[in-house]
Each structure stands twice: as structure tokens, then as C-alpha cells.
Amino acid sequence: MAARTVQEFFTPEFLARLERLSLISRRPFRGRLKGERRSPRKGQSVEFFDYRPYGVGDDIRYVDWNIFGRLDRLHVKLFLDEEDLRVHLLVDASASMGFGGKLGYAARLAAALGFVALVSLERVGAAILRERLAETWPAARGRRHIVPLVEFLSRARAAGGTGLNRALESYAIRSREPGVAVVLSDLLDPAGYERGLRALVERRFDVHVLHVLGREEVNPSFGGDLRLRDSETGEVREVTVDGEGLRAYQERLQRFLDGAERFCRAHEIGYRRVVSDDPIEQFVLSELKGLVLT
């Protein structure tokens, strides 16, 4: 079941492309492994960690020539660098994320980023957010943790209300070490999300928001007299959706989206918007390059 879960999340071709990527951060963190991949960062190695076979593109400076002399095979040294990149994957699993396949899409996005980080020997932790911090997956490092991470994310079910401020504040306070925090959410919380995101920034996280929307939210195909029920509060409203109503909805939606993006830019938070039926491979390999991937 575990292997099939991974295969359901990723095609072999997508995995092969993810293997060539690395996570980036706009802030320095201590303890990062050096020598595993080429990196634009510069730092001073402070502690030997391990060896691994030489691969195309590896820095020749890290080849251990003593091992080559004994085994006639190239191996590179891995060091703990002064930079450490811990990755925090924070997935909104409130009831609204069940609409339009948003939660499943967010889980796959989080798993893709987690895969990149784990094969790069970064430490990865994850959390499920609802009205509060609902469930966490403890930080781990290395390939052997890919399957457990995917299993954790795939178990998430959309349920309950949204409390992004409280959940994110709680996570920021509880986390012993900051790092790259990726928040995957539709941001649909009547109380807002701003205080929670600010809490992460104030705790020196490098914060990124992946704003996940459903296709019907972006471009509704329904109309006429409707009885709508809020999936989180149970509130029911009867509305008539006509041309004027759709135009008003689109205007309010655009204000909401523009406001989220403006807030993130003003607080140096990375922001990308995606619709849940967009090809996930294209979004990861194109839209996230330069934001959290290199």
C-alpha cells in the first residue's frame, strides 16, 4: 500500500525531475549538509558527516582521493555546513479544502516539496491545520522517510473549521528551529490568516504561501436559484446567481486574491496561486522555480 501511495502521488518521470532540484531559502540556518548537491550558497564546513558515491555535477573538491586510491572508485565527502535548511510543510485540512479537490492537490504539492528536501538530506517536518494545529509529523532527514511522509499527507481528510491564525501561531511557538515554512491553504478563514503568517515571520521562518483554489471557485459554472450551505459553519443561504451576481462575485474574489498577494509581498512572504486542476508537474517545475526550488 505504501509503495502504491507514492506511485499515485508521483509518476516515475516526475520523480526523476524532482531528483535534480534543491530547496532554497532567503535566510541562513545552521547545520546544513554541504557536498550533497551543487549550491549557490557559500559557507564553511564545520563537521564531517558521511561519504557517498560521486555523481555527475558533484564538486570535485569534495572527492576523497584516499578512498579512490584504495577502491578505485570516486566518493565525495559530506559535511555539516553552517547553513541548515529545515522545511516545514503546513497543510490546511479544514472542510473548505474538500471543495474542488483542493486538499488532495495541496497534499501532493507538499509531498513533492518534501521529496526534494528529503533526497537533498534536508530535515522535513509537516503539520495538518484545522481550527487549531491538528496533527504533526516530526522532522526527519533522508530518503527512507519519503514513504512515511507521503502516507501522513495522504491520510489527511478535509473536516472541521478553519483557524489559521491560531494554528500557525501555535506552530511558530512550538517549533524549536525555524526554516522554510510552506503554507498550503485556500486562506478561507473569516478571522483572517494575517496574524498567523506574521507569527511565522517574527519567529524568523522563511515563509511561502501556496494559495490553492478550486476551479469552480475561480470560474463558477452554476447559476439560477440556489441554496448554499457553508461546509464549515453549516450556515445556509438562498441566493439567485445571474450575470450581475457572477460579476459581483468575481470582483469580490479578485479583491480577496489581490489582498492576499499584497499582504504577502509587504511582509516578504513568497506567494504563488494555483488552481487544483492545473497540472501539478508543470506548477512545481515552472512556477516554483526561483521561489522555493532551484
Image (cartoon, helix red, strand yellow):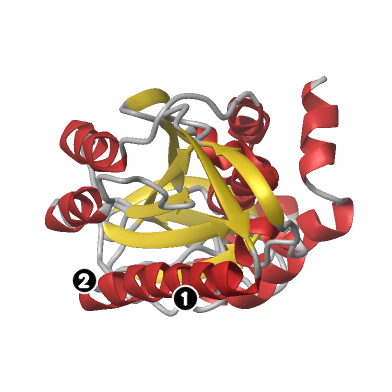
> Quadrant location of the C terminus?
bottom right
Q: Amino acid at mark 1?
A: Glu
Q: Is residue 21 left or right of residue 71?
A: left
The percent coordinates of residue 145 (x first, y second) are: 59, 31
Q: Earlier in the sequence, mark 2 or mark 1?
A: 1
Residue, x 56% and y 41% (percent of image)?
97
> Which residue is nearer to you in this view: 66 or 1?
1
> As rendered, which of 240 and 251 lies closer to the eye?
240
- Return the mark for residue 6: none
Q: Which residue is mark 2?
A: 267
Depth order, front residue of 111/269: 269
Q: Position of residue 188 (x, y in %)?
A: 42, 49
Which amino acid, by three-letter code, is at mark 2? Answer: His
How busy is the neighbourhood of tag 1: few (under 14 within 10 Å), some, or many (20 plus)? few
**With 147 as the anchor, is 13 left or right in this view?**
right
Image quadrant in which the N terminus is located: top right
Instruction: Give 49 or 261, whichever is nearer the viewer.
Output: 261
Image-quadrant location for residue 18: bottom right
Could you tell me how many numbered marks the image carries? 2
| Residue 209 relative to residue 146: left or right | left
Q: Residues within 10 Å of mark 2 (few under 14, many from 20)?
A: few
Furthest-left residue in this view? 202
Element type where label 2 sits in the image: loop
Residue 227, quarter of the rendered image: top right
Q: Which residue is mark 1?
A: 251
- Residue 254, can we see it? yes
